[in-house]
Amino acid sequence: MLNDRYSRHGLINWFSQDRVQNARFVVAGAGAIGNEVIKNLALLGTGHIAIHDFDRIERHNLTRSVLFREDDVGQHKAEVAARRACELDPAVRATAVPGDFWKTLSFEALGRADCVIGCVDNFEARIRLNRLCRLAGTNLIDVAIDTRRASVEVFPFATVADCACYECTLPAGVYTRIAERYSCAGLRRRGLVERLIPTTILTSSAAGALAVSSAMRVLHAPQEMQSAHRILTDTMGATTTMAPLARSEMCPGCADLMPEVRVVPTDPVIGRASLREASCGQDVCLRLSDAVISGGNCTACGHELNAGGPPRLLLARDQDDSLARCPKCGGDMTFVAGDQFTAGELEERFLGQRLPARFAVVDHDETSLVLDFAACQFPAARSSEG
Ligand SMILES: [Zn+2]
Ligand SMILES: [Zn+2]
């Protein structure tokens, strides 16, 4: 349906205002790139935009964020961005989901979305968003910038069966750099300063325009999407290249997946019928989304991690390296950490405990089942709008 507001859009032969008004987008990250992407989506009259960001606005964001004002400093980026998007076009339904998307972006919301646009600023978040989208079969556009270049990678997971994923072309050095943020058992190192990449509005606005152009292509002409591809623009040199992205047989994100992937909401308590049925047998291997610590002891006095209590499973990422000091003698603790367990092993050692992961993947015949723990683990994921 066209009205005066969208009359110019109606003159574009490839553009369908109806299609755009019925579209659902998820934007992960409402920083410099996210601002541009949300602004573009709102001005195009996009039906629904769900904005995920855990961060609050700081003063230095204001040079690169068209949706933020001086008075907004201290407020949640997601909330301010959603409010401003609705001001730009009152017909747009923009919703804010403040928090870590790993906990707030449900598979259900992903299933309803036409496309996710990743505007995050670090590799770890990109890898996580890629895994969620690959498993959900939801189109993903990843956007990145530096001081002069804008990169947009398009992954049409919804339409291309053997589509490369974000991790297929990721250099091994990236995983090394991520690992440097954690000790060998996966504990978060305290006081580690992230390397900042200085950017300006010039690369983020170019990136936002390229990303939403690609999103419009995904929406209007999904059949034209033959493979994943990367668009790279050098804003200073005024050059743009496009290259297909090939799938890797060694990819940590997608090489293990069966041709069919199905998401099954599952209660993460070990031994309960839900998890038992979903994991289909004692010998089946559960590949967890997150590394967990399953035990440990002090190298000096032998004190055990769970001395005096039942063995516990701890989400490694949530622990910091204070856990590495023995509470009894101050010596060094060593840990057993991993992300793969057989169902039988879990029942034998950790019966009645909750698996502290976002999801687990088990293979059954030609299907990879994604046991989705989020609805039980993080209640926010269930209520979040997508
Ligand atoms: Zn891959
Ligand atoms: Zn000790």
Image (cartoon, rainbow, N blue to C red):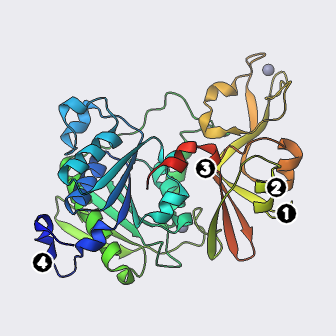
Ligand 1: does it lie within 8 Å of the C-beta at label 3? no
Q: CA distance from mark 3 to mark 1?
A: 23 Å
Q: Secondary structure at mark 3?
A: helix
> Which residue in the structure is indicated by mark 4?
11
Q: Residues within 10 Å of mark 1 (few under 14, many from 20)?
A: few
Q: Which mark is residue 281?
A: 1
Q: CA distance from mark 4 to mark 2?
A: 58 Å
Residue 85: image tag: none
Q: Is mark 2 within 8 Å of ligand 1?
A: no
Q: Are marks 4 and 2 in contact (CB under 8 Å)?
A: no
Q: Under 8 Å from ligand 1: the CB of mark 4?
A: no
Q: Is residue 334 left or right of residue 113?
A: right
User: Earlier along the polypeptide chain: callout 4 or callout 3?
Assistant: 4
Q: Are marks 3 and 2 in contact (CB under 8 Å)?
A: no
- Read off the residue under disc 2: 343
The residue depicted at 78 percent of the width and 16 percent of the height is 328
From the viewer's side, name the closer residue of 290 and 354: 354
Q: Quadrant of residue 250?
A: bottom right
Work out whether mark 4 precedes mark 2 in sequence or the reverse, and give the earlier one.
Answer: 4
The dot on residue 375 is: 3
Q: Position of residue 183 (x, y in %)?
A: 62, 37
The residue at the point 54 percent across, 65 percent down is 136
Image position, residue 34 (x, y; %): 30, 51
